[in-house]
Amino acid sequence: MLANGDTLEGLLEENSSIKREDIFACLDYAGSLTEEQLSLLEILESKTSEFW
């Protein structure tokens, strides 16, 4: 939703059951997944460069 241009305040107004901390927790989780994927990509790139 944020990626589509929604604001934090707008999401909170439209969804009374969620809190600001809920959104931050989701963003934190998504960030941790991205870090893991980038780390795996870096490992694969280093192994590929060694192979060539």
Image: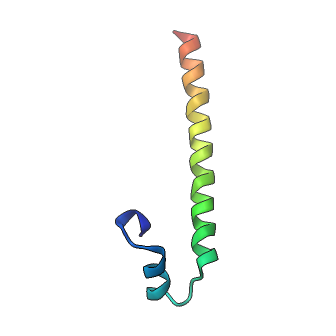
Residue occupying image coordinates x 57% and y 58%:
30
Residue occupying image coordinates x 48% and y 74%:
8
Q: In this view of the protein, which residue sits in the foreground, 13 or 30? A: 13
The percent coordinates of residue 38 (x first, y second) are 57, 39
Residue 9 position (above or below residue 24) = below
Residue 17 position (above or below residue 3) = below
Residue occupying image coordinates x 59% and y 66%:
26
Q: Quadrant of residue 29?
A: bottom right
Q: How many marks?
A: 0
Name of the residue lying farthest toward the left: 4
Name of the residue lying farthest toward the bottom: 16
Q: In this view of the protein, which residue sits in the foreground, 18 or 7? A: 7
Q: Quadrant of residue 23?
A: bottom right
Colouring rule applied to residues: rainbow
The percent coordinates of residue 46 (x first, y second) are 59, 21
The percent coordinates of residue 25 (x first, y second) are 63, 68
Residue 43 position (above or below residue 2) = above
Name of the residue lying farthest toward the top: 52
Q: Quadrant of the N terminus?
A: bottom left
The percent coordinates of residue 13 (x first, y second) are 46, 87
Residue 19 position (above or below residue 41) = below
